[in-house]
Image (cartoon, rainbow, N blue to C red):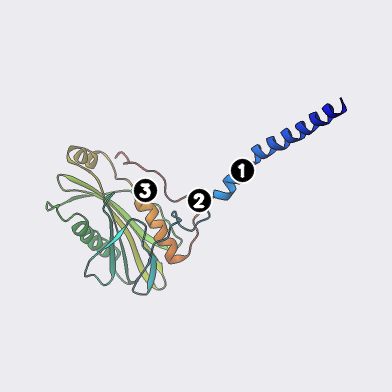
Amino acid sequence: MKLARKLGRSDIFKGAALALIILLIPGLIAQAIKPQFSGMHKKHGPLLTLNGIKFEQPERYKVVPQNNENAIFMFDRKYKEGLFVAVTPNASDEEQTANELIKTSVSKFFPSTSHPYSWRPSPEPKKFSRFEVGGGASMGFNGNLLILTQYHLLHFGGKSIYIGSVSESSTGAEAAELFQTTNGGESMGSCNAFVDIVSSITGEQFDENNSPCVLVGLAPSN
């Protein structure tokens, strides 16, 4: 009987210890895999240099050949999303520079779209950086293709840095309807790429619990 009582207590202790471990494991795993990051992606791409400014080339985006010494254009063929980064003197005209960059981006990323685009402004994009001094967004439709554009303007290191995106939204009848009934939207892929680029330039840290990237659909127009 003594032996039986001893084994019973041992079993109870083992069971209690096992239960405690089971309760602790999820928290330990969560803590171990909790991301600590400056941008939204953990896998870092190569660094590109433009007029003395270094920035990360986001994952999936490939550099597109171009002749502009003040800008680099990148395109994700799978999701049909393009990015541009331009570095100019602070005295450059924001609206003119942004329009030229978007126009060049459209011709490089969607070269088969020959019809002229009609443009509508979209709500100003959310700011990412304390160095951000400007920005804008728009949607363009050429009778078949609807594209979404946005850019962020930073003043950093004595220079103006334009970081923008031009992405395909939809085509055909759906594109025509969305152009008339919405105010544009935002690509999650482009947003995450913005965060990576901004972080690599300014060194700013982005809080995972207050991400500047949220899943945003096409907002209905008023």
Q: Is residue 8 above or below residue 29?
A: above
Q: Secondary structure at mark 2?
A: helix
Answer yes or no: is residue 125 visible.
Answer: no
Task: Answer whether labels 1 and 3 touch (C-beta < 8 Å).
Answer: no
Q: Residue furthest top?
A: 1
Between marks 2 and 3, how big is the CA–CA gap? 15 Å
* Residue 76 % position (x, y): 29, 54
Residue drawn 50% across the image and 56% down it: 37
Q: Using the image, tell me which numbered label, if any, was put on residue 209.
A: none
Q: Which is nearer the eye, 35 or 200?
A: 35
Q: Is residue 17 above or below residue 151?
A: above
Between marks 2 and 1, how big is the CA–CA gap? 18 Å
Quadrant of the rendered structure where residue 94 is?
bottom left
User: Which sits earlier in the primary sequence, circle 2 or circle 3?
Assistant: 3
Between marks 1 and 3, how big is the CA–CA gap? 29 Å
User: Which sits earlier in the primary sequence, circle 1 or circle 3?
Assistant: 1
Label 1 sits on residue: 27
Label 3 sits on residue: 188
Q: Which is nearer the eye, 212 or 37?
A: 37
Q: Is residue 199 left or right of residue 173?
A: right
* Residue 81 % position (x, y): 28, 52
Disc 1 versus disc 3: nearer the observer: 1
User: Which sits earlier in the primary sequence, circle 2 or circle 1?
Assistant: 1
What's under tag 3, amino acid-wise?
Met
Q: Which is nearer the eye, 120 or 37?
A: 37
Label 2 sits on residue: 208
Disc 1 crowd rating (10 Å Cα; few below 14, some 14-19, many 20+) is few
Disc 3 crowd rating (10 Å Cα; few below 14, some 14-19, many 20+) is some
Q: Classify the position of the N terminus by image quarter.
A: top right
Q: Secondary structure at mark 1?
A: helix
Disc 2 versus disc 1: nearer the observer: 1
